[in-house]
Image (tube, grey):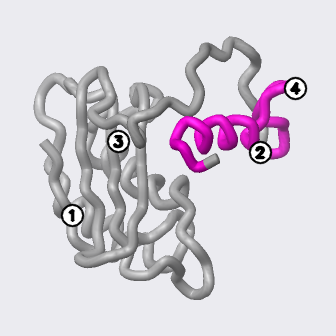
Amino acid sequence: MPFFIKGEPATFATNSVKIWKLILAFAIPLCQGVNKYSCITLRFTLSSPTRNGHSFDLDNLVEPVFSVLTGEKGYFSGKRTNLLWWYAKKNIGTPAGVEIELSGDSPLIRIKGTEIFKDEYDGELPKSSIQRLFPAGLSLKDLEREHMKDMGFI
C-alpha cells in the first residue's frame, strides 16, 4: 500500500538533506517482524525543477530515502543489497513530497506499457563511474530510439 510523505525532497550531499531525512525518519514506521519487502517504487513531487540552479538527479533523490529505509528503519533486512529492484520518477507539483510503495517480488507498475530493452545481459558490470556502461554494439541512444519507435513518436 503506497503512502505519501509531505515535505520538500532533498538530494544526497546537500544542505537540506538532514531535514529531509528527519522528515522521512519521523514518517516511515519501523519494519516489523520478517521483512517481506524486496522492491520499491518512489514517486517524487517537487515544487520546482531546480534548486539553487541545479536540477534534481533521481539517483541523488532516492539516496536519502534508501538510507532511512535500510539504515534507520530496517527495511530490506537493513541491507541495500537485498533490494531486488527499484523504480523512481519525479514530477513538478504540489504538495511536495514522496510517495513510497513497497512490494514483494514483482513490479507494481509498467512503464508506459512498453519495454525499452528485453533481453538478458550477462556481461561484466561497470566497476567505476568512468567505465563504459554498455558493451560495444549497444548504446543508450539505440535503446531510446527503439523506445521512441515503439511509442509511435518516430
Reading the image, the residue beneath label 3 is 70
Residue 147 picture location, percent across and down: 59, 38
Q: Kindly identify which numbered label has been placed on residue 129.
A: 2
**Three-letter code for the amino acid on which mark 2 is drawn:** Ser
Q: Residue at x 84, y 37 (%)?
A: 131
As helix, strand or loop, the secondary structure at mark 1 comes to strand
Q: Is residue 146 visible?
A: yes
Spatial CA distance of label 1 from label 3 is 17 Å
Spatial CA distance of label 3 from label 2 is 24 Å
Spatial CA distance of label 3 from label 4 is 36 Å
Reading the image, the residue beneath label 4 is 136
For marks 3 and 4, give the one nearer the viewer: 4
As for residue 144 lying within the magenta part, the answer is yes
As helix, strand or loop, the secondary structure at mark 4 comes to loop
Spatial CA distance of label 4 from label 2 is 17 Å
Q: Earlier in the sequence, mark 3 or mark 2?
A: 3
For this view, does 18 lie left or right of residue 151?
A: left
Quarter of the picture containing the N terminus is top left
Q: Residue at x 52, y 63 (%)?
A: 12
For marks 3 and 2, give the one nearer the viewer: 2
Within 10 angstroms of label 2, few (less than 14), some, or many (20 or more) residues?
few
Reading the image, the residue beneath label 1 is 5
Residue 37 picture location, percent across and down: 25, 29
Within 10 angstroms of label 3, few (less than 14), some, or many (20 or more) residues?
many
Q: Nearer the viewer, residue 104 or 70?
A: 104
Residue 33 picture location, percent across and down: 12, 27
For marks 4 and 1, give the one nearer the viewer: 4
